[in-house]
Amino acid sequence: MVLRVDAAAGKALVSHRAIPGRMPAMAMPLRIDTAGLTPGTRIEFDLDEKHGAARRVKRIDTRDAGEFRFPDVPEQLPAGAPAPDFTLTNLRGEPMTFSSLRGRVVLVNFLYTRCPLPEVCPRLAASFASLQRRFGERITLVSITLDPQHDTPEVLARYAASLRVGPTWHFLTGDTTPVARRFGLVHWPEEGVILHNSQTAIVDRTGRLAAMVEGSTYRLEQLADLVKEILER
Amino acid sequence: MKTMRLSIAALCQAGLLLAQPQPAAAPKADACSPPPGAVAPSLPAKLLEGQGKIDLKITTRSAEAQAFFNQGVAQMHSFWVRESERSFLQAAALDPESPMPHWGIAMVAAGDYRPGFQLDYVNGHPTKITKRKGQPQGGEARAIAAAAKAQKLAAVSGKATDLEKLYIVAAAARRDLTRRDPNADYVKALRALIAQHPKEVEARTYLALQLMSGFETPSKRPRTGSMEAVELLKAALVDSPDHAGAHHYVIHGWEGSTFAKDAWPSCQRYGELANNIPHGLHMPGHIYAQTGRWADATKSFADAAKNEVYWMKQDTLAGNGHHGHNVHFLTQSLSFAGKYEEALAAARSLLDYKETPREAKQADNYRTAYRQGWFAVLRTLVQHEKWDLILDGKTLPDYQKPREQAWRQWAVALANLAKGNRAQAEDAARKMDAQLKNFSVPALRVAQQEMKGQLAAKTDRKLQQLDKAARAELALRYTEPTSYPRPVLEVLGQVALKEGRAEVAERAFRQALEQYPESVGAKAGLRAAMEKRTGRAVEAAGGGLE
């Protein structure tokens, strides 16, 4: 996962997984072709140890589901753009405006409480729970439902209780589809489930979209490295 | 240069595959009822009205578990399998030690609790055993796991009666993939249960459903097993006159037969008993449509559509494929009743159901609500000879999929021919033929045969070819609504009339009325043919039309 990009120097800070027998998982600066890379981009590459460089870099396409591809979303904001402002309903049934969180590092993900697939929504929620334990109130977490008809404030409150959420983790419902699309989410119901891609956005203290992580199968350490990097800015 | 590739892609993709569940592959789904979910339905379930009352006593310490169990069985009887599984799961949650809720999941989650003929079974099991590929997934995997769980719980002393154990043995047999023919063993186990408990209505209805093998087309001769199913159901209704499942299976067991009318009382009663399940309201329409009760068929499908839309609004996770089937059938009924505007409006309403990205990617999937709507529009325009609308390029959207492209060219050819544009008609027919070199289904092969007849220059050749196409259409596999847009026999009658062959026309229309009793088009054609042949006016009602 790319943590930071220095296009002028042709370098990026990359949090990689452990390479068995060679090195543990770590954040490592690498010489790399930075075209198309932004914080949060997940890549695979050949490691040129001698030159500290990444070769044959390929962006991991989490939208490709084999049988079909999740379509691109024209409304999706690019990295660095001001995050969208919106007002949704929190688990107490009160309106909450996203811009009220300005000045904090905010992570946003999208899920639905009756998602039965352990690898998707439960995993996203578990990642946030873990980040909450690790960073405490230094970060704010926002989970937005993709199933607002079912995920009423009451349902979200029960779900949040099961995750033992703290005061800086918000669950939101309401007309969430337009918000989801600004973050690159596409979803639709299909015979018993909601099919969706997964996006985790990190908004920095200035309210800009600092990073966008696609998919749900990243390592938690990689996401934590990215959060740390943005907190330290 | 020393490099090593970081192999994270494979991990991510494995995760992604898990992330994109495929709807459970119900064998040969006919869209007549929604399939099981790719994943287990979420709880809680609710106790609902209008599901059809069932009372199958089980060993449980929880009255609420018993109520949800009964509801699960009732929903199973209406093939509402996702809700049935939800009810069984609720019962299991209320009494985790009771084996029968797991038996219920074993019965429904695989998506094969359906009439044998819909699964291509004869006499209860596949005629050809094919080697299975890959591991069971989705609903089938859940059903297998549930059967194992039911067996385990039933082995605990005092947790299951002998009768419950027999039910579990039967379901477990069907889910045991190590057996050569699990379905045959399921049938044997049900027979063993019934031998010990001859008055057990539930088991008799399961056996009947499994045995019903349908009827040959066009002879309507029963296949092996079908008549035993009929007798089982007749007897079950004597013992339990308000059994929703038995009434439902009478409809399936009688459809496509020479005695479809005998199912009328069950149509009435089933629709009353399961009046809050879309399939319960929908199924009587099958018999009504086959027997010429078009107004009743229309009401069935309209009521079912209303109920389906209600449930779709209640839960965003409900699919719309069955709604597509229902409204498609509504369209066909309205067309045969001569109600063109209503038919077209119903058909067009389905075009509002845009396909999901996954559906849109599929080259051929005629079961999506949109594609059923598309075909419903086509059949309505062709049946009512709305040639200008076919050619306007808007009323029938230009949908770029092989099946739809072939049908479109067929309709365009017909429209041009009717308007005297022979060259354009031949061009469209050629395009259809070209399309069908890479993709074809039996109904489209009939369409090619019909087109040959339509384009034939000489009258005898024309009539001969249309007759051949009509016979091919009659031999198509039984489906409702029909896979052919409108009866070729009616076309044959019309062409014969136009060519001055009144006797041929009269015969064709009479046969068409056997195929679709009370078809407004066939009746009008028959009247015209008789008038032409006799030179006398024929009264609208009666007047020798029977």
Image (cartoon, coloured by chain):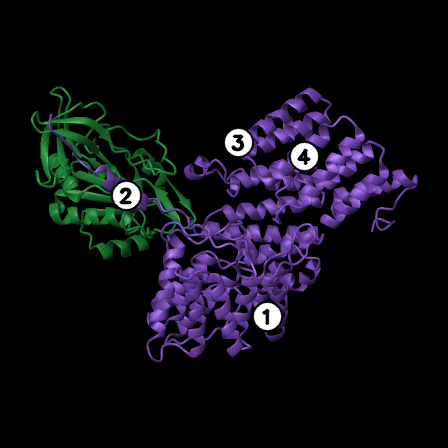
Amino acid type for the residue under numbered disc 4: Gln
Which numbered disc, 2 or 4, marks the residue that appears first in the sequence? 2
Label 3 – label 1 distance at C-alpha: 50 Å
Instruction: Tell me the crowding category of disc 2: few under 14, some 14 to 19, or many 20 or more residues within 10 angstroms, Cα based.
Output: few
Residue contact at pointers 2 and 1, CB within 8 angstroms: no
**Mark toward the start of the polypeptide (2 vs 1):** 2
Q: Mark 1 vs mark 4: tell me if same chain.
A: yes
Q: What element carries label 3?
A: loop
Q: Is residue A136 above or below residue B80?
A: above
Residue beneath disc 4: B449
Instruction: Classify mark 1: residues with Cα within 10 Å, few (<14), some (14-19) or many (20+).
Output: some
Q: Which chain carries label 2?
A: B
Chain designation of label 4: B
Q: Which of marks 1 and 4 is in front?
A: 4
Q: What residue type is labelled 1?
A: Asp
Instruction: Tell me the chain of label 1.
Output: B
Residue B242: give its label: 1
The CA distance from mark 2 to mark 4 is 48 Å
Residue B186 placed where, x, y %? 47, 66
| First of labels 3, 1 by sequence position | 1
In the rendered image, residues at marks 2 and 4 fall on the same chain: yes
Q: Mark 3 lies on which chain?
A: B
Q: In the rendered picture, chain B carries what hue?
A: purple
Label 2, label 1: how far apart the Cα atoms are: 50 Å
On residue B438, which mark appears?
3
Q: Does residue B405 show up?
A: yes
Q: Which of B366 and B436 is in front in this view?
A: B436
